[in-house]
Amino acid sequence: MTKAQSSTTNPSVLWADIGVNLTDKQFHDDRDAVIQRAREAGVCWQLLTGTNLDESRLAIELAGQHDDLFATAGLHPHSARFYSPDLEKEFRELLRHPAVRAAGEMGLDFNRDFSPRPDQEAAFEAQLALAVEARLPVFLHERDAHERFQPILKTFRDDLVGAVVHCFTGSKTALFDYLDLDCHIGITGWVCDERRGKSLAGLVHNIPDNRLLIETDAPYLLPRDLPEAPPKKRRNEPSLLPWVGQRIATLRHQDVETVAAMTTANAQTLFAAR
């Protein structure tokens, strides 16, 4: 256990990580140990992110082996060019699985444009419709695409049971637009980055208590302010969620216990069993 993990470990404080890429190849050799470290750090609930058909299936399979793990199922905008009627049929089936608590990861990414923007928008709309049909909240990805993302989401929002803008790093305007749509906001270790995360750090206090969620997005977005390297250098993992939570608590002028309790309750309410 690292200094960062030990300094934030408190058995009486329980956390929910709403964005973990636990099926990533970086966890292939020690996945069980990663899960155990998370539990020892007080992370009592994890949502495993499905970013394509294969990863969604793996997330569901892994979640089925643990009472405290759940999954999403969807197609990331990077792969939107592969969306098809056959793929939609497969996702419709996966969304019926009891371990699946959200549709996604879905949305728009105009930063990298790995898929053409018209394909991204079509896949986003199709998956929003699937989420409405399945009566599931949506797990959303938006990067440099707010002007198109917000109106598309708004069209479906009244029919969706819930929504979280995962790994939010946007502007104040975008934040308030999403809050106006009654979205939850997922905050990661981006706020621990004194370079890129300065703007976000200044916005976190604006998120209402009942709309705040936290996540590691592990193995990505390792907090830059860790006092020492994690077990595998440069790899983030869910046991570091309390470190992120501590930073968020400081920015919001709240007790760590308060942030942990309310974000865990928010996660378990939004992603409740059907």
Image (cartoon, rainbow, N blue to C red):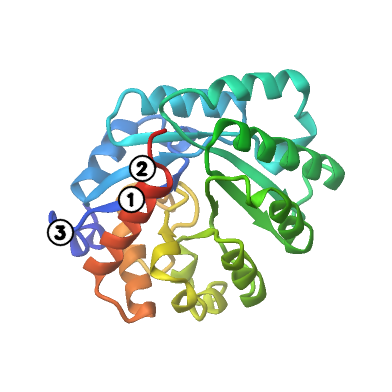
Q: How far apart are marks 2 and 3 (CA)?
A: 18 Å
Q: Name the residue under label 2.
A: 46
Of mark 1 and mark 3, the one earlier in the sequence is: 3
The kind of secondary structure element at disc 1 is strand
Q: How far apart are marks 1 and 2 (CA)?
A: 6 Å
Number of marks in the image? 3
Which numbered marker is on residue 16? 1
Give the x, y percent position of residue 159. 62, 45
Contact? badges 1 and 3 (CB < 8 Å)? no
Residue at figure coordinates x 64%, y 51% from the top left: 157
Of mark 1 and mark 2, the one earlier in the sequence is: 1
Determine whether, in the image, residue 20 is placed left or right of residue 243.
right
The kind of secondary structure element at disc 3 is loop
Residue at figure coordinates x 22%, y 66% from the top left: 257
Residue at figure coordinates x 71%, y 59% from the top left: 150
Q: Mark 3 points at which residue?
A: 10
Contact? badges 1 and 2 (CB < 8 Å)? yes
Q: Which amino acid does label 2 sit on?
A: Gln
Quadrant of residue 168 within the rendered picture: bottom right
- Furthest residue to the front? 158
- Depth check, front residue: 217 or 69: 69
Q: Which amino acid does label 3 sit on?
A: Asn
Give the x, y percent position of residue 131. 60, 36
Which of label 2 and label 3 is nearer to you? Answer: 2
